[in-house]
Each structure stands twice: as C-alpha cells, then as structure tokens.
Amino acid sequence: MKLVSAIIKPFKLDNVREAISEIGIEGLTVSEVKGFGRQKGHTELYRGAEYQVDFLPKVKLEIAVNDEVVQRLVDAIAEAAHTGKIGDGKIFVYDLEHAVRIRTGEQDVEAI
C-alpha cells in the first residue's frame, strides 16, 4: 500500500478530482495549506501599500491506494494539475504500513 500526497494549486482541485475518479479512485483527503518553493511568494498592493506575501495558498491531497494503481494515480494528478508555470506543485509517494477502517475494523488493503 502507498500514500500519495500531492500539493497543487487550489484552482486545479476540481480537475484533479475528476481525473482520479476516472481511474477508479473513490476517496481522498483535502487540506488547505500554505507554503512556498521556487515561487518564493509575491508582492501585493493593499490600500496603496506594497507588502510581501511569503506563503502562497495551496491544496494538499492525500490518497491511500494499492501498489498496482500508484503510477496511474501519479500520472493522473500530474496531468490534471499541470499548467506549465512555476508553482504547479509536487507529488510524494510514501509506503503505508497499516490501515484500519474504523467503522468495520477492516485492515490494510480492505480498509482502503
């Protein structure tokens, strides 16, 4: 089992959700996060004064999947989140040792 974590631009969330639904992924967790990478923030104007915004709004997705679908999931996220501009995001894949569905007690692959 793997845990796929992706940081994407917020306006790409619907595209990514549709793309992963098309490959049969049924569940995901979404969190609103802030951060920066190569973008290093940007300058905004508020009431005539410029100020630096260091952390940019992003969306973090977490999806637990079987090993067999990891590459298709990564490809679907990458394609749906791609704009070609700096700040498109990152995808991370982690080993997932154990999972339990609280309602039924199912474990590991059956739980996801």
Image (spheres, rainbow, N blue to C red):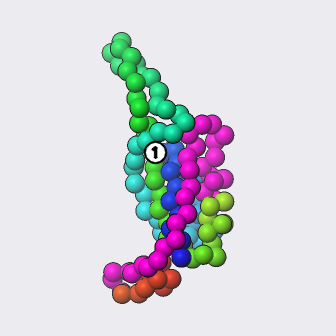
Q: Percent x, y for residue 58?
A: 46, 45
Q: Is residue 32 left or right of residue 91?
A: left
- Position above or below: 77 against 109: above
Image coords of residue 16 (percent x, y): 57, 55
Three-letter amino acid code at disc 1?
Lys
Quarter of the image where one finds residue 77: bottom right
Pick the front one: 59 or 4: 4
Q: Position of residue 5 (x, y in %)?
A: 50, 59
Q: Is residue 11 above or below residue 30?
A: above
Percent across and percent down for residue 32 are 39, 49
- Per the image, the residue denoted by label 1 is 58
Q: Nearer the viewer, residue 94 or 88?
A: 94
Q: Mark 1 falls on what kind of element? A: strand
In the rendered structure, the answer to whether residue 80 lies left or right of residue 100 reads: right
Instruction: Tell me the crowding category of disc 1: few under 14, some 14 to 19, or many 20 or more residues within 10 angstroms, Cα based.
Output: many
Please give the name of the residue rendered at 37% of the width and 21% of the height, measured from the top-left corner: 51
Q: Is residue 26 visible?
A: no
